[in-house]
Amino acid sequence: MSQTLEVVRLSSALGAEVRGISLGEVGPIEADAIQSLLTEHLVLFFPEQHIGIEEHVAFGRHFGTLEGHPNLRNPFSDQPEIFELAASRGGVADEWHSDITFQPEPSILAILNMVKCPEVGGDTLWSNMYRAYDELSAPLQELCEGLTALHDAAPHGKPEEMTTHPVVRVHPITRRKSLFVNEHFTRRIVELSREESDVLLGYLTRWASNPRFTVRYRWSKGTVAMWDNRCTQHFVLNDFDEERIIQRVTVMGDRPEAASPPRWPPYLRTRNPGATSRHDQQLNKLLGSRAKSLESNKK
Ligand SMILES: O=C(O)CCC(=O)C(=O)O
């Protein structure tokens, strides 16, 4: 299939609309071209596709191994690789996030099919995490590069599902550094006290949503979007009344590569534990279970 792609950028920070291709007929050559466009624009939109579930899954498989959502049940089909979110008045992801960061190997990219969309509202925003890192001051970049953060699945009612990731990761294709903390899943900077972590994490997660780094997309039925979770975050506007149905396939996963190794040990309150030490319970639990598994590996 020979198809001429028309590509229109949607903001200075990220995002492009792509026409002149039928996603239901993509082969390896077209998939490579799409991967190159994704590497350049970070999020792509393909209007008027109207693909079905089989085509959606087949398209996703060009980019890696697909996995259903680990915590949210798929109510409508026995196709395990599709995750559907049907929402009206609630149930939308209106907190900035990148997908499934509570797992050691989070999603690398996602492909979303807009099956039913409200006449107005329900736009999605994406933000460019390369820019969020690049525009930090040099001292703050250096501090962040030496830190790791605890992420958990508390938004899915499972705070015990947790892992740590570098605060600054390196993209395996571009080798560029990006900021890798998000308001939805990131709980704590491991090397800082709870109070310090709250301040820095609060700052970084607000910074990540600076309008200068973003694009906002107005959907129509049949549009397919595809984004790179390693260098973007997204947020859905919960401002609609009609039903909004999306179907997503999720490409898993690589272990985020740190920009540098952690420069400090985890924060541990060693003296005078008091009422405030309850704030360290989750971190201590994670560190305790890691120590135990190291110990049992030695045996
Ligand atoms: O519904 C959307 O626009 C995005 C959904 C979302 O946040 C996700 O798939 O992680």
Image (cartoon, rainbow, N blue to C red):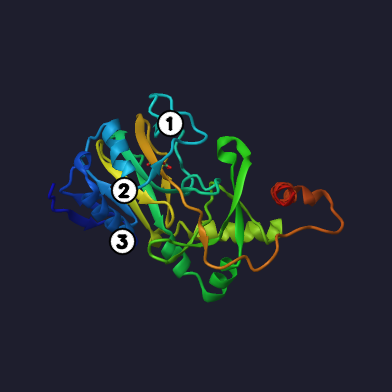
Q: Secondary structure at mark 1?
A: loop
Q: Is residue 188 left or right of residue 167?
A: right
The amino acid pointed to by label 3 is: Glu
Gap in angstroms between the C-alphas marked 1 and 3: 35 Å
- Tell me, yes or no, if residue 120 can be seen here: no
Q: Which residue is mark 1?
A: 89
Q: Depth check: give the residue in front, 107 or 234.
A: 107
Q: What amino acid does circle 2 point to? A: Tyr
Please tell me which of labels 2 and 1 falls first in the chain: 1
Left or right position of 183 against 173:
right
- Residue 177 vs 185, above or below: the answer is below
Where does residue 253 sit, x and y in percent of width and height? Answer: 45, 48
Q: Which mark is nearer the camera, 3 or 2?
A: 3
Of label 3 and label 2, which has the lower sequence position? 3
The number of callouts visible is 3
Mark nearest the camera among 2 and 1 is 2
Farthest-out residue, bottom:
138
Name the residue furthest front.
Answer: 299
Q: Which x, y percent locates residue 265?
A: 70, 63
Residue identified by numbered label 3: 40
Q: Secondary structure at mark 3?
A: helix
Q: Is residue 292 left or right of residue 33?
A: right
Q: Secondary structure at mark 2?
A: strand
Q: CA distance from mark 2 to mark 1?
A: 19 Å
Who is closer to the viewer here, 160 or 289?
A: 289
Question: Any mark on residue 215, and which?
Answer: none
- With 162 as the anchor, is 126 left or right in this view? left
